Amino acid sequence: SKDYNGMSYTASAFACSFRAADLVRKEITLTEGSKIFASWKNPPPPVYIQFFFFNLTNPEEFLKGEAKPRLTEMGPYTFRQYRPKRNVTFVDNGKKVSAYTVKSFVFLPEKSVGDPKVDMVTTVNIPAVAVMNRLKGMGFWVSSGVSMYMGSIGTTLFMTHTVEEMLWGFKDPLLTRLKTIKPDTDEYFGLMRNKNGSDDGEFVYHTGKQNYLDFGRIYTWKGEKMLSIWKSNQSNMINGSDGSGFHPFLSKEERLNVFTPDLCRSIHMRFEKEVEVKGIPAYRFTPPRAVLASGKNNPENEGFCLTPKNCLDDGVLDVSVCRNGAPVVVSFPHFHLGAERYAKAIDGISPVHERHQTFLDLNPTMGVPVRAMKRAQINIHLERVTGFPLTRNLNGTIFPILFLNESVVIDDASAARIQKLLLIVTLVSHFPLVLGALGVILLLVCIILQHPSNDPEYPSNHLATIQNSLASA
């Protein structure tokens, strides 16, 4: 009957849809032999990291309190980043996998604006500010004594070094002197010092074998399920993945959580718009303003302020607690999504959404990133410190040092493999429609064969031609 055929057709459609879903769930697991595992272990698409420095052009005026700091942007200085996973070990009967992501960097002159060994940048003397910050509350006489000592060796609030020295390290005179007092002091300073060939510690991930929704979700970092540096359990939670992959069948309504060791915290992303990358449809997810909002505007973030009387405003995060006490503040580039007062306090800062946002473009069927831009800015909190005359005109400026853009776009070979898998999934899920269409075509052919045209000009050998074609097929 018609109803029975309709029920059979519906059942077939459901069965094929389930088979398509099972096909994707089988491939999107961190297990040996799955199509995703090899690329997760050794990512084939090139990852680039670009550094943009902020060069201070009026240090004397700013130091005297006569003008706002005036900055010019220098960059990009581009490096190819390699990040294979090492010591990959399956645990808990294959439900979880542990790994270290080792990062190395190779400079790419053809993608850079200049030579990092030659180009000079003037910025805040970060080692000096870190020392002064550590001496807060130690008393006027202690601070004054250290201040005079710093003056005697020529230490000022600002320094000028090459881009390469700023990134990979230089021997700092102040740190060298401190090493004689405190032997475990590292006399070298660099924003990326010891990062080349390093890792962020051991991660243990859910493989997705037991539940596809857990694919790539972090179970522990450095052996811990939670951090212990912030004030609240919510702030200390290690949520979501590391950003390299997400569970399949994403929806636009989802809140995607990502844990970032560089920020010492988890952040979340929301759907922004649909995009297409190399023929692959994708959803763009990006951090909303609430991610770095102050505790007063987003109660979820109250635990990130460790000094309630000195909480920062929207768009910045004090991470000194995980930077050995150095007054480091992170934000999005040019204080994108931040309070206007931070950008207005500095000449040369102008946030632009398209240039400064962080985003992930994910294929919703597979949860695979096809394009990503991770952008972050490193700042130093400059404020008056008792006993240090150099700081007397400082008023709490969040001073930009550099911002980085870590980017990746799926390579052509990987894109072709994903397109092929998506095609298979589409064909399997639409198999009942394909069968129905073939049935209609065959029915029409039979009708034509049984009812030749009454048109006198209808070729007499036309039916024979059709029959011969069908026979040969």
Image (cartoon, rainbow, N blue to C red):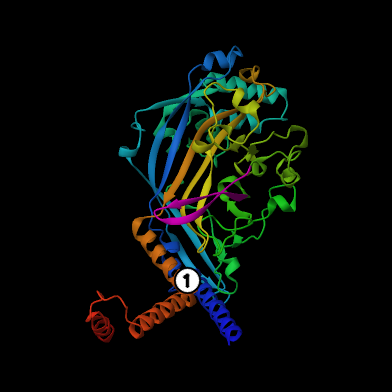
The image quarter in which residue 95 lies = bottom right
Question: With respect to residue 8, does 299 lie above or below?
Answer: above
The region drawn magenta spans 268-288
- The quadrant the C terminus occupies is bottom left
Q: Residue at position x 32%, y 81% from top?
A: 452
Residue 82 spot, x, y in % from top left? 40, 52
Is residue 403 shown in magenta? no
Q: Residue at position x 51%, y 16% from top?
A: 58
Residue 428 spot, x, y in % from top left? 46, 74
Residue 424 spot, x, y in % from top left? 42, 71
Q: Residues within 10 Å of mark 1 (few under 14, many from 20)?
A: some
The image quarter in which residue 219 lies = bottom right
Question: With respect to residue 400, does 367 lie above or below?
Answer: below
Q: Residue at position x 33%, y 41% from top?
A: 108
Is residue 287 shown in magenta? yes
Residue type at numbered disc 1: Glu
Looking at the image, can residue 197 be seen? no
Looking at the image, can residue 119 be seen? yes
Residue for badge 1: 27
Question: With respect to residue 366, does 124 lie above or below?
Answer: above
The reply, left or right, for residue 311 in relation to residue 262 is: right
- Pick the residue in front: 295 or 456: 456
- Pick the residue in front: 279 or 172: 279
Residue 323 spot, x, y in % from top left? 59, 41
- Pick the residue in front: 301 or 281: 281
**Magenta stretch mostly in which secondary structure?**
strand
